[in-house]
Structures are given as C-alpha cells and as structure tokens.
Image (tube, rainbow, N blue to C red):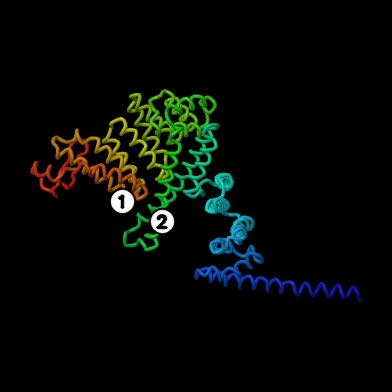
Amino acid sequence: MKKMRHVLTLLFLLVSAPIVFAQANADCTIKYNLFKGDYNAKNYENAYENWLWCMDNCPTLSVNIYKYGVKIAENKLENASAADKPAATELVMRVYTQRLKHFPKDKAAIYDDIASFKREQGATDDEVYVWLEKTFKEDPIELSPKNIYKYFDIILNKYKDTDTQKVFDTYDEVGEAVELKREYYSKKIGIINAKDSTKISSKDVKNRKIYQQLTTNLSIVESGLDQKLATISTCERLIPFNRKNFDKFRTDGIWLKRAVSRMYNKECTDDPLYDELVEAYVQADPSPQASVFYAGILMKNGETNKAMDYFKKAVDQETDSYKKAGHLYKVAQILSRKGRKSEARSYCYQALKEQPTMGKAYLLIGSMYASSANSCGTDIVSKRMVYVAALNKARKAKSVDPSIGSLANRFINSYSDNVPSTKDLFVAGVKSGTSHTIGCWINETVRVP
C-alpha cells in the first residue's frame, strides 16, 4: 500500500509539473505584456509592479526586461524621497547586474552604461574608473564619447608623472577606438548619401542626422584628447622618450606605428629619429600606412620618383574605401607640406572619390588656395578672389561633413574677411555676380561676390 502511494504521488507530480510550469510561463507572459504596454505609453509608474515581478520571477524571459527596466528604475530613482534614494539607486544597479548575469552578450556596452550612471550619481573617479576599465578591456569601441574623454582624463591624471608610456598607449588606443567609431558612422552616412535622392526615406534623413551628430561628438572628444595630451607630447618630450624606447620596440609594429604617428602629427619629422622610426616601421609592418610614411621621408630626402612609387603602392594595397581615402589624404598632406599643391589637390579629390564625406580634404584644398593668394593674383581683386575659391571649399567641407562644423567655421570666417570688398570691386571696375577665372596652379572659375 505504501509503495502504491509513492507511485501515485510520483504520477501526480509528473502530471501536475507541466501544468504548474505552463501557468508560471503564462503569468510571466501576461505581466511582461502589461508592463511593456505601460512602458510604451511612457507610464513608467504603472509599469513598475509588473516589471519588478518579471525581474523577480522571470529573469530570463526577455532582454527587454532589462533594456526597458533601466528607464523604469531610473524613473523610480528620480521620484524617490531622500530616504528612499539609496534603495532606488541599488535597484538601477540590480537591473544592470542581473542583465549581465542572464544576457551578457553586450557586456562592454553595459559596463559603459554603468560607468555613465555612476558618474551621474556623483561617484568618485576611482569608482567610475573600475567600470570604464572593464569597458575598455572588453571592447574600447563601446566607450561613449563622454566616457572616452573621462577614461583618458583619469589615466592622464594618474600616470602623467610616473608612467608616460601608459598615457601614450591609452591615448593611442582610445584614439583608435574613436577612429573605428567614426569609420562606422561615416560609412552609414555614405550609404544613405549614395541613394537616389527620391529614394531617401524620412527614416534615412533622421538616421543621417543622428550619425552626423555622433561623428561631431567624436570630433569634439578627439580635440579634447589632443588638448589634454598637448602638455606631454611636445617634440622636446617625444624625441628623447621615443629614442629611449626605440631599441626595446624596434620590431613592434604597433609601437612603431604609434610613435611615428605621434611625431608626424606633432611635426617632429625633421629630427633624424623620425626617419629611423619610419624605416623600422616599414620593416616590422609593410602595411599601406607604413608605405605612406616611408614615402614621406623619401620625398623629404629628394627621392621623388621612389616616393611616388611608394604612395601608389600604399593606395593600391588598400581594399577598404574608407581606409584608402585616409591614405590618399595623408599623401595629400605630405605633398602639400612639400609645396606640391597641384598634386596634393589631386590626391584630395581622389580621397573624396573614395569617401565623399571627408570634409577635411576640402579644407586642405582651401588652405592651399589661401596660401597661394599672392602668387596667383596680380592685383588686389585677383588676389582676393583666391580667397573666394578657398571660401567655397570651406563651405563645401562643412556641408559634406557637419562633424567638422566648428573647424570649418574658423576657415570660413577667416576667408570671408579677405574676399574683395565692394570698394575693391568698384575701383577695379569688376561687377558683382560675374565670373572670374583664377589662373596659376588653381585654374578655377568662381563667382564675384
């Protein structure tokens, strides 16, 4: 009889268990849909109870429990009394930690969100740094623009007097992350711009505006990082620092790439060490970028034909259009510095063919035009008309690449101050609105203002 009772109990459990689980799943689905409906209606207070029940009882039902839950928990925090704020703060953190446990796929992005939340709550730099470091180690590309800046700022303050190499390495790594993010958004913008104008949807327009704002934010961050590093990245400090470490990293392609790039960007290229670093870089990593730098020192040493061969080799090696545009622009910069302006302009246009949103290529052309005003004009009006051509290029730069708007505005204002005045045109007998052809290497027709 006792054995029979055990058998019947087991049968009951086997039959009832699926019913219990089915009921639990049904409850989860009902409460999930209820809180989701309130969330979509932005009624976060009403969503709270059902959402919290799902957090407690159905933690693996959907990642949306956590994606939406952050906003619900933050709303609770915003409306909490002073006495309830600690518990409400802990609830927000619970959303993040529970998501990391059950849906860890986007780990780096979650760490970055936690760092941002900690900053908003007034946490110390040390507390924030813990989460920024986790993000950086997991995937530096997931650092938000504000957190990129904050992460480097903390590193700089911690190590500028004790570990310069760590500061430089961090700067380079976050800079590379910025460039990867910029590349991603620039390609998105390029895809939209490549569409027929009649086929660009309202969603495309909205997304393009978002991507442009994100690239603008990245440009602001990049400028801020450069300013932060400026005090310890002068030629006077870079040259002895790189000389001291050169033997140790002579075959390290990554270290050499970063050392060369820093010296190039800071215009420390006249020092013999720069040539040594570039030659070692080409040996350690015969990449397109290394070829561009090597061609630059060949150009500097008067080996023009060989330099042009290396420039061509670098461009031909690259298959990615965004990266190819970067190499072409770098070639244009080098040629511009050597005074070979017509060739530099040609490379700028080649870069723009690969990446039409590269506003800085137009700015480089404009700056070369402006620097040629005296040599490409014979009188006050013809000289000042060169600034009109430069102004057109600066405006074009801003229109194709809003992310460099503030920089383009500085060029626009400078060139605008130098275009021919009404008095200049009257004295010269030149009528406003007529065409004017600039000679010299520029050879471009513009409209008289």
What quarter of the picture does the N terminus occupy?
bottom right
Coordinates of residue 429 in the picture (x, y in percent): 8, 43
Coordinates of residue 10 in the picture (x, y in percent): 82, 72
Q: Looking at the image, which residue sits at the far front?
A: 82
Q: Residues within 10 Å of mark 2 (few under 14, many from 20)?
A: some
The residue closer to the viewer here, 387 or 156, is 156
What's the residue type where badge 2 is placed? Answer: Ile
Q: Looking at the image, which residue sits at the far right?
A: 1
Q: Which residue is mark 1?
A: 399
Judged left or right of residue 249, residue 272 is left
| Secondary structure at numbered mark 2 | helix
Judged left or right of residue 372, residue 167 is right
Q: Residue at x 57, y 63 (%)?
A: 80
Q: CA distance from mark 1 to mark 2?
A: 15 Å
Q: Residue at x 68, y 71 (%)?
A: 24
Task: Indicate whether 423 appears above or below 257.
Answer: below
What's the residue type where badge 1 is placed? Answer: Ser
The image's mark for residue 210 is 2
Q: Is residue 449 visible?
A: yes
Q: Residue at x 54, y 37 (%)?
A: 158
* Residue 225 location, quadrant: top left
Coordinates of residue 88 in the picture (x, y in percent): 60, 61
